[in-house]
Image (cartoon, grey):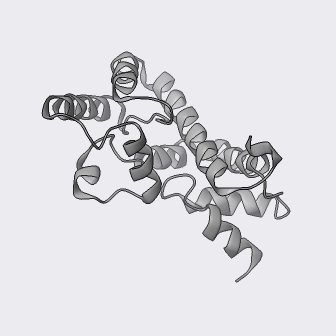
Amino acid sequence: MSARENFVARFGGVFEHSPWVAERAFDKNPQIALTTNAVHGALVAAFRAASDAERLGVLRAHPDLAGKLAIAGELTDDSKAEQASAGLDRLSPSEHARFTELNTAYTEKFGFPFIIAVKGLGKDDILSAFERRIDNDRQEEFETAAAQVEKIALLRLHSMLPGDDNA
């Protein structure tokens, strides 16, 4: 396996179902140091350099929070662990109904699912952010969601890479 193939195999899932981000990051700098900050910086640069349509594709690759994929057990391992850490796998029927209602309204308004880095948040924190952000305009929310995708990537890399910049 080539160095590029190894890099993409290792980091291609950091941006949800979007290995092209890792491919472009490696192509731009095949000598990326394998530390959290270096890999994150390279991936974020590739993501930000992409067209709005490509970035929208990354946003749309994310699952709804506590949505159909979670119920069907079809989340990626990362997404499953992230949602479980926030208690989204243990919602009451009324809480699940509220998430479903917000997911539907949000996706209809913006054209992509609500995205938030859930580490350190509980379901009430997430619902509060959901209810606040649904009032944003589309451009503001696109940028907010993209920033959250970058934060999720950083959190995922922290769990993947050794190094002094992982503290």
Q: Is residue 82 above or below residue 16?
A: above
Q: Is residue 120 above or below residue 157?
A: above
Residue 158, position as x, y percentages in the image: 66, 48
Q: Quadrant of the N terminus?
A: bottom right
Q: Residue lying furthest bottom in this view?
A: 1
Q: Quadrant of the C terminus?
A: top right
Which residue does the image show at 53% across and 57% down from the upper left?
18
Which residue does the image show at 42% across and 19% down from the upper left?
137
Left or right: 14, with 118 as reference point: right
The answer to whether residue 61 shows anywhere in this view is no
Which residue does the image show at 33% across and 40% down from the upper left?
65
Residue 115, position as x, y percentages in the image: 43, 36
Left or right: 47, with 118 as reference point: right
Closer-to-camera residue (43/81) = 81
Left or right: 25, with 18 as reference point: right
Residue 152, position as x, y percentages in the image: 55, 42
Which residue does the image show at 79% across and 43% down from the upper left?
165
The answer to whether residue 154 shows anywhere in this view is yes
Closer-to-camera residue (71/24) = 71
Q: Within the image, what quadrant is residue 67 found in? A: top left
